[in-house]
Image (cartoon, helix red, strand yellow):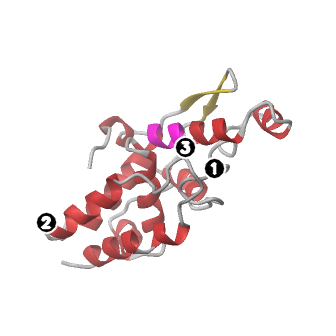
Amino acid sequence: MDVDPEATLRCWQVDLDIGGHTYTVPALPARDWLLALLRLPGGLAGPIPDVVPGLIPDEDLADQIADGRVPEEECTRAARDAVEAAAGMRWWSAIKLAHATPGSPIGGELIVQGVDAAAVSLGAYLSAAYRVATRNASEKDKGRIDSELAAPPVGLGEDAWDQDELNSQFATAMAATAGRR
């Protein structure tokens, strides 16, 4: 899996062009990003309102969205860009990894290993989750995980992604390989 190594080094602010203005997601730890990514109302192909406008502390943006000056599609694009910048990987890969960690053997192993989501960047957290999920995987299982992470959502650009599909096969494959020693 391709990861931008800079995204793993520290929490960075992310500047986004939305509605002709530049807005900033402050430098946030993985915990804040994960909480936002775990609350996807429309699944992987839908908006990510807990990222944009959720992580942007600027009332002007919320006002522009509320009165229709900034369309939902632009917010969705900006949120995806923000996730990619913070995670250092494709937004859909980041969201799939984020959904596979809490309450799973992967998330438990990250805690046991001392990975603190309140202290590390989203890129570092997701890279560690990937490592835990694949470290004992056979080449076949690792290949399947890599393929599932690399695959863009079905119906990208349409509201065709089923949230249950996001959590089923991928999370099962990751949890199965994480438990092997």
Tell me if 164 is positioned left or right of 97 in this view.
right
Which badge, 2 or 1, comes first in the chain's sequence? 1
The kind of secondary structure element at disc 1 is loop
Task: Find the residue positioned furthest to the right.
Answer: 67
Residue 147 quadrant: bottom left
Q: Is residue 169 visible?
A: yes
Residue assigned mark 2? 139
Position of residue 23 relative to residue 39, above or below, is above
Residue 101 showing in the rendered view: no
Q: Amino acid at mark 2?
A: Glu
- Mark-to-mark CA distance, 2 and 3: 34 Å
In the displayed structure image, the side of residue 20 where residue 69 appears, left or right: right
Q: Quadrant of residue 168?
A: bottom left
The CA distance from mark 1 to mark 3 is 20 Å
Of the pair 70 and 111, the residue shown nearer to us: 70
Q: Residues within 10 Å of mark 3 (few under 14, many from 20)?
A: many
The label shown at residue 28 is 3
Q: Identify residue for label 1.
A: 47
Residue at (63%, 59%) from the top-left corner?
42
Q: Amino acid at mark 1?
A: Pro
Q: Is residue 99 left or right of residue 1?
A: right
- Return the residue nearer the eye: 164 or 174: 164
Query: Mostly what secondary structure, the magenta segment?
Result: helix
The kind of residue tagged 3 is: Leu
Q: Is residue 24 above or below residue 163?
A: above
Query: Which residue is depicted at the point 36% across and 43% down?
Result: 8
Q: Residue at x 70, y 41 (%)?
A: 72
Which residue occupies 54% across, 46% down?
157
* Mark nearer the viewer, 2 or 3: 2
- x and y, in percent, of residue 16 in the image: 58, 29
Q: Tell me, yes or no, whether the two marked residues, 1 and 3, touch with CB atoms within 8 Å.
A: no
